Image (cartoon, rainbow, N blue to C red):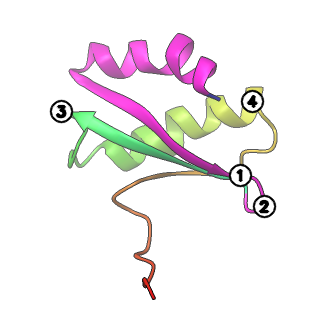
Amino acid sequence: IKDLLTSRIRPFVQDDGGDVQFVSFNEETGVLTLKMLGSCSGCPSTNATLKNGILKMMKYYIGEIKDVVSEEEKPATAKA
């Protein structure tokens, strides 16, 4: 996952003034969590970038990935 991010995804995101960073991958749910940085952080097009670009490419190369979310989208978990 990290190699694919570095070699194929980050260059395109960086061309638009942003960046993307690996946060986690949940093997049980297939959800990849990324952190969008730079101009991509808070950008209205971030969701389209995640779903139409990053998710499609990740699913093509790594079949176990079912969804890609940004760290900001993740539901907050209660801490005990």
Which label sits on residue 66? 1
The amino acid at mark 3 is Ser
Residue 2 in percent (x, y) is at: 59, 25
The amino acid at mark 4 is Tyr
The amino acid at mark 1 is Lys
Q: Nearer the viewer, mark 4 or mark 2?
A: 2
Q: Residue furthest right?
A: 63
Which label sits on residue 10? none
Is residue 5 shown in magenta? yes
Residue, x 18% and y 33% (percent of image)? 39
> Which range is magenta?
2-29
Q: Nearer the viewer, mark 2 or mark 3?
A: 2
Q: Cα distance, mark 4 to mark 2? A: 19 Å
Residue 72 in percent (x, y) is at: 33, 59
Residue 17 in percent (x, y) is at: 21, 21
Residue 20: quarter of image: top left
60 sits left or right of 35 in the view: right
Given contact means CB atoms under 8 Å apart, are the residues at marks 1 and 3 in contact?
Answer: no
Residue 54 in percent (x, y) is at: 53, 34
Disc nearer the start of the sequence (2/3): 2
Q: Secondary structure at mark 1?
A: loop
Disc nearer the start of the sequence (1/2): 2
Label 4, residues with CA under 10 Å away: few <14, some 14-19, many ≥20: few
To which residue does mark 4 refer?
60
